Image (cartoon, rainbow, N blue to C red):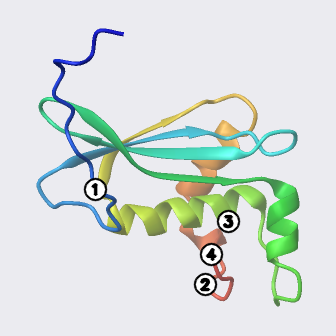
C-alpha cells in the first residue's frame, strides 16, 4: 500500500481524560433494532483519536436492571451514563443524530431530575 515510509503514532489506552485536551462526543441514539452508540474522540492539533466507545439497547438494559428496585427509561439511563462519562472526559460538544430517539435523549440530558442514583451503570 505504500505506507512503508509513514511514521505511525503510538496510542495508549486511557481511562481518564487529559485536562488540556478537548473531547467530542458522537451519539447515534438507536435503541430497538440497533444499539445506541457513543464514541468519544480526543481532539489534538495534529490528529484525532477514539478514546472511548459504549453501546446499549433496550433489551440489554432490561437484562441489566433485573432485580433492581426502581425503574428508569432507556434514554434517561443513557443520559446518566453520558453525564458520568463527562466527568472523566469533559466536553463542550456533543453531536446527536436527531432521528430514532435523538430528541428524547437530548431532553433526558437536560432533565437530571429523571435520574435514579440507586441504579448501577
Who comes first in sequence, dot 3 or dot 2? 3
Relative to 91, does residue 97 appear above or below in the rendering?
A: above
Q: Which disc is residue 121 wearing?
A: 4
**Mark 4 and 1 residues: CB-CB less than 8 Å, in contact?**
no
**Mark 4 and 3 residues: CB-CB less than 8 Å, in contact?**
yes
Q: Is residue 91 left or right of residue 71?
A: left
Who comes first in sequence, dot 4 or dot 3? 3
Q: Which disc is residue 77 wearing?
A: 3
- Where residue 118 sits, quadrant-wise, is bottom right
Secondary element at image label 2:
loop
Residue drawn at 34 percent across, 67 percent down: 88
Q: Residues within 10 Å of mark 2 (few under 14, many from 20)?
A: few
**Mark 2 and 4 residues: CB-CB less than 8 Å, in contact?**
no
Disc 2: which residue: 117
Viewer-nearest of labels 1 and 3? 1
Indicate the quadrant containing the N terminus: top left, top right, bottom left or bottom right. top left
Q: Is residue 105 left or right of residue 17?
A: right
Disc 1: which residue: 12
Who comes first in sequence, dot 1 or dot 3? 1
Residue drawn at 68 percent across, 83 percent down: 119
Q: CA distance from mark 3 to mark 2?
A: 10 Å
Viewer-nearest of labels 4 and 1? 1
Q: Residues within 10 Å of mark 1 (few under 14, many from 20)?
A: few
Total labels: the figure holds 4
Which residue is the extreme one toward the top?
Answer: 2
Q: CA distance from mark 2 to mark 4?
A: 9 Å
Viewer-nearest of labels 1 and 2? 1
Q: CA distance from mark 4 to mark 1?
A: 25 Å
Residue drawn at 62 percent across, 44 percent down: 37
Amino acid at each position: 500500500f505504500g505506507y512503508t515510509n509513514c511514521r505511525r503514532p503510538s496510542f495508549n489506552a486511557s481511562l481518564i481524560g487529559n485536562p488540556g485536551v478537548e473531547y467530542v462526543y458522537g451519539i447515534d441514539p438507536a435503541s430497538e433494532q440497533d444499539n445506541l452508540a457513543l464514541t468519544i474522540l480526543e481532539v489534538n492539533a495534529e490528529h484525532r483519536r477514539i478514546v472511548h466507545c459504549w453501546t446499549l439497547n433496550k433489551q440489554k438494559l432490561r437484562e441489566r436492571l433485573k432485580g433492581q428496585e426502581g425503574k428508569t427509561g432507556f434514554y434517561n439511563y443513557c443520559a446518566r451514563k453520558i453525564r458520568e462519562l463527562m466527568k472523566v472526559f469533559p466536553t463542550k460538544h456533543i453531536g446527536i443524530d436527531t432521528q430514532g430517539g435523538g430528541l428524547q435523549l437530548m431532553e433526558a440530558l437536560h432533565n437530571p431530575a429523571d435520574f435514579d442514583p440507586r441504579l448501577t451503570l
